[in-house]
Image (cartoon, rainbow, N blue to C red):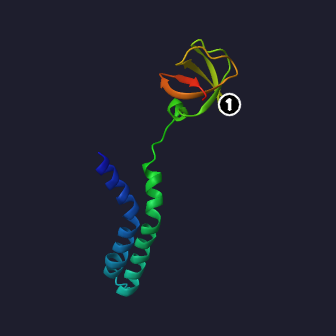
Amino acid sequence: MKSLKNALKLSGILIDEIVVGLFLLVILPSAGIEIPLKVSLTIITLLILKDVLFVPLLWKVLDKKVEVGGEALVGREATTVENLNPEGVVKVGGEYWRAESIEGDIKAGEKVKIVGLSGLKLLVERQK
C-alpha cells in the first residue's frame, strides 16, 4: 500500500515533466512546429532540477498524516474547568472537551496533558 502511495506521489510530482516533454517532443513536431532539441532538453532539464531541489521538502508535507478532532489534541496541554474525579471537563484552545483523568482526581484550574482518546472523551494526566 505504501509503495502505491509513493508511486502516486511521484507521478504527481513528475507530471509536469511528462506533459511538457510530450508537448515539446511529440505534439508540436506533429503539428509542424519544430523546436530545437537543445531548447527542449534544456526546458526538461530545468523542470527536473526544480524537482530535485523541491521534492525533499514536498515529500515531508505529502507524508504528513492529517489529524482532526481529538487525535490532533494528543500531546497538547489543557486546563481543567471542573474537578476531574475521574471525569469532568477541560478547556483546550478555546474548546471544551469531556475528559477523564488516568491518575486519580485533579482539581479545577490545574494544567493537564492530553495522553489519549476514548471515543470523544480525552484521557489526561497531570502536567509534569
Disc 1 crowd, CA 10 A, few/some/many (<14, 14-19, 20+): few
| Image-quadrant location for residue 101 | top right
Which residue is farthest front? 128
Residue 72 horizontal side relative to residue 10, left or right: right
Give percent across and percent down for residue 85.
59, 11
Which amino acid type corresponds to the residue marked 1 in the rendered image?
A: Gly
- Pick the front one: 95 or 18: 95
Find numbered disc 1 in the image and state the secondary structure of the residue it sits on: loop
Which residue is farthest top? 85
Compared with 37, 15 (above or below) is above
- Pick the front one: 87 or 52: 87
Q: Look at 51% across and 28% down and name the residue there.
A: 115
Judging by the rendered image, the residue that carries numbered circle 1 is 94
| Labels in figure, total | 1
- Pick the front one: 73 or 128: 128
Q: Look at 38% across and 81% down and name the residue there.
A: 40
Residue 21 horizontal side relative to residue 75, left or right: left
Give percent across and percent down for residue 34.
36, 86
Q: Look at 63% across and 23% down and name the residue there.
A: 90
Give percent across and percent down for residue 98.
58, 19
Quarter in which the N terminus is drawn: top left
| Image-quadrant location for residue 126 | top right
Quarter in which the C terminus is drawn: top right
Q: Look at 54% across and 34% down and name the residue there.
A: 75
Compared with 105, 19 (above or below) is below
Compared with 94, 121 (above or below) is above
